[in-house]
Image (cartoon, rainbow, N blue to C red):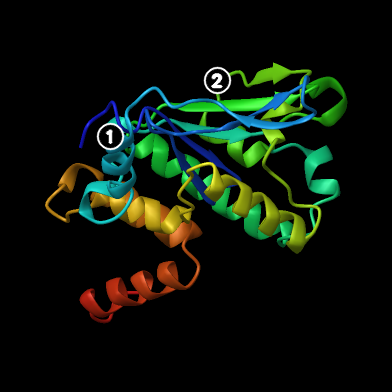
Amino acid sequence: MSNKRRQFLGIAAGAIAVPATSSLVLAQGNPSRGREAPIPAQTSVPERRSAKSELTGLSALLTPEECVVVLIDHQPFQFANLHSHEPTMIINNVIGLAKFAKAFKVPVILTTVVEARGGRIIKGLQDVFPEQKPVDRTYINTWQASGGVSVEAHDMAIRRLVQAGAVPITWIALSGEWQRDWARESTIADAAKILTEHGGGSGVAFAWEMQLLGGSKP
């Protein structure tokens, strides 16, 4: 898989993977016309088609080496108007994702917006990276194409991301793509521990399997 094809992976709220390709066409405001105008792609039409086909199948699976995780504004103020998902689920998922990124040595960027008023990032997330200072912004532009004040707002945000070329993925599915092969023994222990702590039903099933393998041991 070419690093040129997927130059960046952003993940917000532990649920969305946003791969960028060299042929991705985005919309940009055109003040003279008062509407959206496409930015011309820098590759030829045949190359665009080729890159698009790589978003499916085995070639689309993500590897730790080509990923960067961006965890955007997991602050008290943002959770105050969160109605698309149950807050404890979001917290569980994003901490699980952060731990997986750390275990697989994937670079992680933490952000806040006006931290002094919106609050610091949630403690459980900061605890995964205790020495890392989040990037604090005044602009709210990282939320463009995002939303979560309602189920509909979240759905509209996902649709907009897909139209721009993003490929949504859950954090559990992403962890499976990173691990890929049980022969990758260096990360198995961490992966099992994280799934047990944050994997919901998958974690319960894994704990049960360990119980069976351990015989009468608790």
* Residue position marked by numbered label 2 in the rendering: 132
Q: Secondary structure at mark 2?
A: loop
* Label located before the other in sequence (1 or 2): 1
- Quadrant hosting residue 202: bottom left
Q: In the displayed structure, does residue 58 sit left or right of residue 13?
A: left
- State whether residue 64 appears in this view: no
Quadrant in which the C terminus is drawn: bottom left
In this rendering, is residue 88 above or below 208? above
The alpha-carbon separation of the residues under discs 1 and 2 comes to: 39 Å
Q: Nearer the viewer, residue 9 or 59?
A: 59
Q: Nearer the viewer, mark 1 or mark 2?
A: 1
Q: Nearer the viewer, residue 213 or 116?
A: 116
Q: Which residue, given by chain and number where applicable, does mark 1 sit on?
A: 47
Q: Residue at x 33, y 35 (%)?
A: 45
Residue 121 vs residue 130, the one in the foreground: 121
Number of marks: 2
- The amino acid beneath tag 1 is Glu
The answer to whether residue 36 is visible is yes
Horizontal placement of 67 versus 47: left or right? right
Q: Which residue occupies the foreground of this view, 214 or 82? A: 82
Left/right placement of residue 114 relative to residue 17 reads: right
Q: Is residue 80 left or right of residue 46?
A: right
Name the quadrant containing residue 6. Answer: top left
